[in-house]
Image (spheres, rainbow, N blue to C red):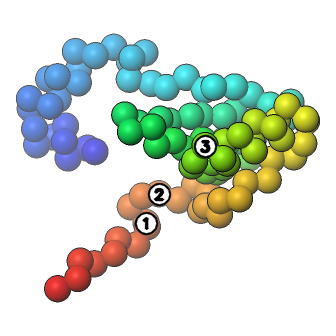
Amino acid sequence: LEYQFTCHPKFKAAVTTISCKDLRLDPVGRDKNGCVYWLQVDHDANLCLYKEDQDEETWQLIANNREELIKIIGQLKNGEEITPSIVSNNNEDSCSAEVPQPQT
């Protein structure tokens, strides 16, 4: 991401015209334990719901499709512990993830 700002002046100029508020997502909610939930949906309706525990400074991908989202909403409404069916790496930096090599 930093590369885009240092090596592409047009990109940097375009982004700096956008207010900080417009660049940031707002959380979609909080649970009774104080965890914060973040939802991202792209133009093709792909979704990712993340749970952030601010006390523990961790986050977790807990839903990435409609069925999982419905399950999580039900658990929250019933006051249940969130049990995501997705296994994700908490706090993994994208730079530390292994990048698959292209087939030759």
Residue 101 in the image: state x and y as whole percent: 28, 78
Of tags 3 and 1, the one toward the viewer is 3
The amino acid pointed to by label 3 is Arg
Q: CA distance from mark 3 to mark 1?
A: 29 Å
Can you say which quadrant of the picture contains the N terminus? top left
Q: Residue at x 23, y 77 (%)?
A: 102
Mark positioned earlier in the residue sequence (3 or 1)? 3
Q: Cα distance, mark 2 to mark 1?
A: 5 Å
Residue 81 drawn at (x, y percent): 87, 46
Q: Earlier in the sequence, mark 3 or mark 2?
A: 3
Q: Horizontal placement of 3 versus 82: left or right? A: left
Q: Position of residue 95 (x, y in %)?
A: 38, 61
In this rendering, the answer to whether 99 lies above or below 64 is below
Residue ID for mark 1? 96
Q: Position of residue 88 (x, y in %)?
A: 61, 61
Q: Nearer the viewer, residue 60 or 44?
A: 44
The residue that mark 3 highlights is 66
Q: Which-is-in-front pick, marks 3 and 2? A: 3
The total number of labels drawn is 3
Quadrant for residue 20, please give it.
top left
Q: Residue at x 90, y 35 (%)?
A: 78
Residue type marked 2: Asp
Q: Which mark is residue 73?
A: none
The answer to whether the residue labelled 2 contacts the one labelled 1, judged by CB atoms less than 8 Å apart, is yes
Residue 5 found in image quarter:
top left
The numbered disc on residue 93 is 2
Quadrant of the image occupied by residue 29: top right
Identify the element where label 1 is drawn: loop
